[in-house]
């Protein structure tokens, strides 16, 4: 008879233990790579280049490339979209203030925006994972559906421009920029005085 732990659960199988250890190690190295933005993106570009070379070399798997392109477009839209839609900001702002007044603790965390680094890390990780999965799919001939690839390419370009046009008009309408280029610099008194002094000449 198998021994049962004190909490009534059966001991973990070696496969589950290995999976848990691998998951912890993977998350550890993923967290350590967080401050190295340029190296992470170089790794993602390397994965993309390997996939492109594989597709170019075998001259096939265009449906996988199309699906990858649609997925990347979806990731890009999620990356450049605000966490809270400005059209609904008034309602959400009132809801956040109500939660804070009621002192609901954990619920008020939902009102805060994620940091730019977290979003960048998630975007990079999803992109790299997508290229790796697509690369692995190119080794199975079942995914090599014969198709006239220029039609897929132009349809993807059409979807890209249509979607990005809508997103850019939304960004212009509500005056937000999805990227953070560091700390914003403001003109101080000294620059204001020097410009006002130049008008007197």
Image: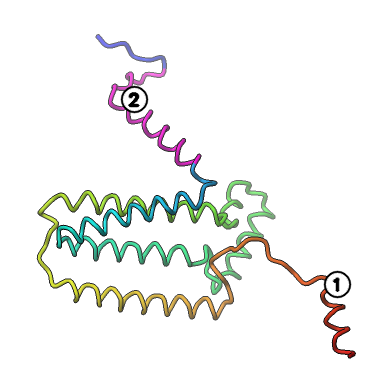
Q: Classify 200 as above or below 67.
A: below
Q: Which residue is mark 2?
A: 17
Taking the image as shown, residue 77 lies to the left or right of residue 140, namely: right
The residue most toward the top is: 1
Which of the image's four quarters has the C terminus?
bottom right
Q: Classify 57 as above or below 189.
A: above
Query: For numbered disc 2, what is the local secondary structure?
Result: helix
Where is residue 8 drawn, in percent x and y?
Answer: 37, 18
Taking the image as shown, residue 125 lies to the left or right of residue 190, namely: left
Crowding near pointer 2: few (<14 within 10 Å), some, many (20+)?
few
Per the picture, the main secondary structure of the magenta-coloured stretch is helix
Nearest the eye: 43 or 27: 43
Q: Which residue is mark 1?
A: 190
For residue 23, which numbered disc appears in the image?
none
Where is residue 65 drawn, in percent x and y?
Answer: 24, 62
Calculate the distance from the C-alpha at mark 1 to the C-alpha at mark 2. Answer: 63 Å
Which tag is nearer the camera, tag 1 or tag 2? 1
Where is residue 163 drawn, in percent x and y?
Answer: 38, 75
Q: Earlier in the sequence, mark 1 or mark 2?
A: 2
What is the span of residues highlighted in magenta in the rendered image?
7-32
């Amino acid at each position: 008879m198998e021994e049962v732990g004190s909490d009534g659960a059966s001991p973990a199988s070696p496969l589950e233990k290995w999976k848990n250890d691998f998951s912890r190690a993977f998350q550890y190295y993923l967290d350590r790579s967080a401050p190295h933005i340029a190296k992470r993106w170089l790794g993602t570009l390397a994965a993309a280049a390997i996939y492109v070379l594989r597709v170019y070399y075998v001259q096939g798997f265009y449906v996988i490339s199309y699906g990858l392109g649609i997925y990347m477009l979806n990731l890009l839209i999620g990356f450049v979209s605000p966490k809270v839609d400005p059209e609904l900001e008034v309602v959400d702002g009132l809801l956040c203030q109500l939660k804070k007044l009621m002192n609901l603790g954990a619920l008020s965390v939902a009102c805060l925006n994620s940091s730019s680094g977290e979003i960048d890390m998630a975007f990079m990780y999803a992109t790299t994972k997508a290229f790796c999965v697509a690369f692995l799919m190119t080794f199975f001939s079942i995914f090599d559906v014969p198709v006239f690839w220029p039609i897929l390419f132009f349809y993807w370009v059409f979807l890209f421009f249509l979607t990005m046009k809508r997103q850019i008009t939304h960004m212009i309408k509500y005056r937000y920029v999805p990227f953070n280029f560091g700390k914003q610099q403001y003109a101080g008194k000294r620059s204001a005085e020097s410009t006002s002094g130049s008008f007197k000449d």
